[in-house]
Every structure is written in C-alpha cells, then in structure tokens.
C-alpha cells in the first residue's frame, strides 16, 4: 500500500493531472460559494430583531453552523467529487504507470451511480449516528468517526476503480479479500478531507490511490 501511496502523491504534481484537479477545485469552490451566498440570503431575509447584539450573534452562529456542516459532510462531498472524476483520474494513472495493460472501457454509469448514492447514504447515516459520541467523547468519538469514514471512503473508491475492469460481484469479492489495506488507504483519504485546502484534492488522491491498489492486486492475481 505504501508504494501505491507514493505513486498517488506523485500523480498530483503530474501536468496531465492538473486539468482534473482544476475542474475539481472549481466545482468545490462553486459549491462553497453557493452555500455561503445562500446563507447570507437567508440571514438577510430574516426578520430584524429589536436587539442589534442578538442579530449579530445570530449571524455568527449561522456562519459557525455552516462551517460545522461542511466539516460533517466533508466525506460524502469528497466521495461525490471522486465519482465525477474517477474515469479521468484512472485514465491518467493507467496511461502513465500501466501503459502495457489493456485499456478499460470505463465503469458503467448505472453501476457507478449506484455505488456513489449507496455510499453517500451510508456516510450520512453513520455520521449522524456517531455525532453524539463526538460530543460526549470528543477524542474517542472523533477516532471512531475517522475509521468509519475511512472504511466507507476506501470501499467506495476501490469499488469505483475496480468497476472499470470487473463486474460488480467480482469488484466486491476483491475488495473484501483486501479489506485491511483498503481501509488503511481510506483512512488516509478521510484525514485529507478534514484538512483545509487538502480536502480539495482528497477525492482525486483517493481515486488515484485506489486505482494503483486495484492494478497491484490485479497484476498479482494474474501471476498466481
């Protein structure tokens, strides 16, 4: 897995990869700006209270709530971006590192959409279920949430990478067989989603990492 991590990091600085990163960053910024403008519009249309200090406090609370919300939904947003650009990322990785391999036709749209929607629903449910633990036991709860997000992120990215070459049942079987390494890679991606600015490239890094892992296991199985 560590070799795959190094290759995925190297791809971020590859010129062929820059266009994909630029598109992902642009969409992320558009999302954040839209949420911010929507919040400001909502605050502007709220009834003006007779106490100026209370109006100011509500503005601060709403802004803080937006930041907390973005932190909570960071993992599912990252996953959705990863599903948008997975084919572009995988093609760049395979073209650079695996030119001798047969080209993939790409993941079926219906299968990719199913995996992305299933993952998003799971992350929302798990995050909300673990939220009380984050409040009651901040350290322990945060660690549990990180592991849960890592498991879900690793699962989704690996399945989406594998679906470019395998049927869904085969992709699921390979993921289960190598679950520990995939979990480790998912945790790395989950950590990046919690770091400002790094979260902009976390989906692309995750897609590149899981493409490398898939190709490693595919080559190993072909030699067995």
Image (cartoon, rainbow, N blue to C red):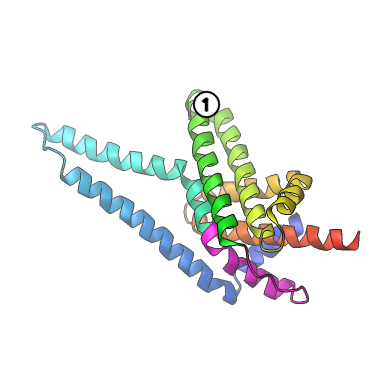
* Residue 88, picture quadrant: bottom right
Residue located 68% across and 61% down the image: 211
- Residue 69 in picture, x, y percent from top left: 40, 41
Judging depth in this view, the residue of 153 and 56 nearest the camera is: 153
Q: Verify whether residue 26 appears in magenta.
A: no
Q: Is residue 194 visible?
A: no
Q: Is residue 173 left or right of residue 28?
A: right
Judging depth in this view, the residue of 97 and 168 nearest the camera is: 168
* Residue 113, picture quadrant: bottom right
For the record, the magenta segment spans 82-107
Judging depth in this view, the residue of 62 and 157 nearest the camera is: 157
Residue located 63% across and 72% down the image: 92
* 206 lies above or below 44: below
Q: Does dot 1 land on a helix, a strand or a loop?
A: helix
Q: Verify whether residue 85 appears in magenta.
A: yes
Furthest residue in direction top, as rendered: 136
Residue located 72% across and 59% down the image: 166
- Residue 41 in picture, x, y percent from top left: 21, 49
Please name the predominant secondary structure of the magenta segment in the image.
helix
* Residue 142, picture quadrant: top right
* 191 lies above or below 131: below
Q: Which residue is mark 1?
A: 133
The quadrant the C terminus occupies is: bottom right
The quadrant the N terminus occupies is: bottom right
- Residue 200 in picture, x, y percent from top left: 49, 58
* 108 lies above or below 46: below
Q: Is residue 18 visible?
A: yes
- Residue 111 in picture, x, y percent from top left: 60, 56
Label 1 neighbour load within 10 Å: few <14, some 14-19, many 20+: some
């Amino acid at each position: 897995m560590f070799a795959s991590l190094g290759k995925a990091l190297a791809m971020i600085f590859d010129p062929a990869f820059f266009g994909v990163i630029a598109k992902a960053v642009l969409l992320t910024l558009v999302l954040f700006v839209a949420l911010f403008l929507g919040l400001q519009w909502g605050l502007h249309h709220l009834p003006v209270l007779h106490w100026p200090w209370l109006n100011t406090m509500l503005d601060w609370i709403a802004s803080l709530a937006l930041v907390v919300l973005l932190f909570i939904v960071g993992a599912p947003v990252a996953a959705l971006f990863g599903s948008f650009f997975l084919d572009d990322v995988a093609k760049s990785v395979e073209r650079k590192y695996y030119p001798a391999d047969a080209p993939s036709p790409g993941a079926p749209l219906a299968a990719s959409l199913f995996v992305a929607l299933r993952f998003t629903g799971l992350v929302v449910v798990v995050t909300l279920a673990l939220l009380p633990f984050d409040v009651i036991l901040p350290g322990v709860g945060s660690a549990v949430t990180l592991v849960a997000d890592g498991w879900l992120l690793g699962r989704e990215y690996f399945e989406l990478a594998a679906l470019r070459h395998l049927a869904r049942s085969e992709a699921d079987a390979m993921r289960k067989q190598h679950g520990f390494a995939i979990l480790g890679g998912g945790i790395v991606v989950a950590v990046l989603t919690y770091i400002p600015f790094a979260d902009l490239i976390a989906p692309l890094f995750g897609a590149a990492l899981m493409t490398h892992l898939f190709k490693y296991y595919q080559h190993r199985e072909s030699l067995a």
